[in-house]
Amino acid sequence: MVRRESFSYTVQARCSRADAVALLSDPARQGELHPLIVRVRRLPTRPGARASYAITDRLELGPLRFPVTYQADVLVVTDDEIVTVARQQPGTTVRNHTRLQEEGDVLRIDVEITLSAPAPLFGYAFRQARAAHLGLASRLGAVLDRKAGGGPVPN
């Protein structure tokens, strides 16, 4: 049995839409934002994708730390929307749907994450995904603001 659940968050930044799209559509640039990522490799682009990657995260389970590698595809990249899908065996999928909207001089970034996983893995996978993405969200606004101000941005 597969379980599915979503969570969402919103980040605001004073940056250009182009800067936000460039960062959010390229997993290779998110290593210092995403608390679990330890390696990103570009793969040959899969059919239907704009770009494909192998991403290695370091997960924790009690005192154990272990690497998990999964494939991620960037499916949609426009000025208003980014969609990525990550797949890891056995049967775990994370869909990231990001929407961007200007509100005055602030860019609003709304993100919805949907995780699907086999029931025995779901609780752990969902907690890890939520913690990682909320960790990313807590850093994202400051990184984009810094980029807009001309300061260094993690690559």
Image (cartoon, rainbow, N blue to C red):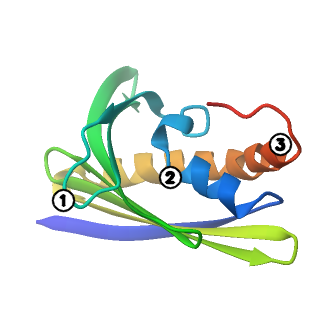
Mark 2, secondary structure of its residue: loop
Mark 2 surroundings: few (<14), some (14-19) or many (≥20) residues within 10 A: many
Q: Residue 119 — which label? A: 1
Residue 34 higher or lower than 114, as above or below: above
Mark 1, secondary structure of its residue: helix
At 27% from the left and 39% from the top, the residue drawn is: 70
Q: Say whether residue 35 is visible.
A: no
Residue 79 rendering spot, x and y as whole percentages? 59, 69
Residue 11 rendering spot, x and y as whole percentages? 70, 62
Q: Please, what is the three-letter code of the amino acid marked with disc 3?
A: Arg
- Distance between mark 2 and mark 1 Cα atoms: 30 Å
Residue 75 appears in which quarter of the rendering? bottom left
At 61% from the left and 39% from the top, the residue drawn is: 33
Q: Please, what is the three-letter code of the amino acid marked with disc 1?
A: Ala
Q: Residue 146 — which label? A: 3
Question: In the displayed structure, does residue 19 sit left or right of residue 47?
Answer: right
Mark 1 surroundings: few (<14), some (14-19) or many (≥20) residues within 10 A: few
Judging by the rendered image, the residue that carries numbered circle 2 is 25
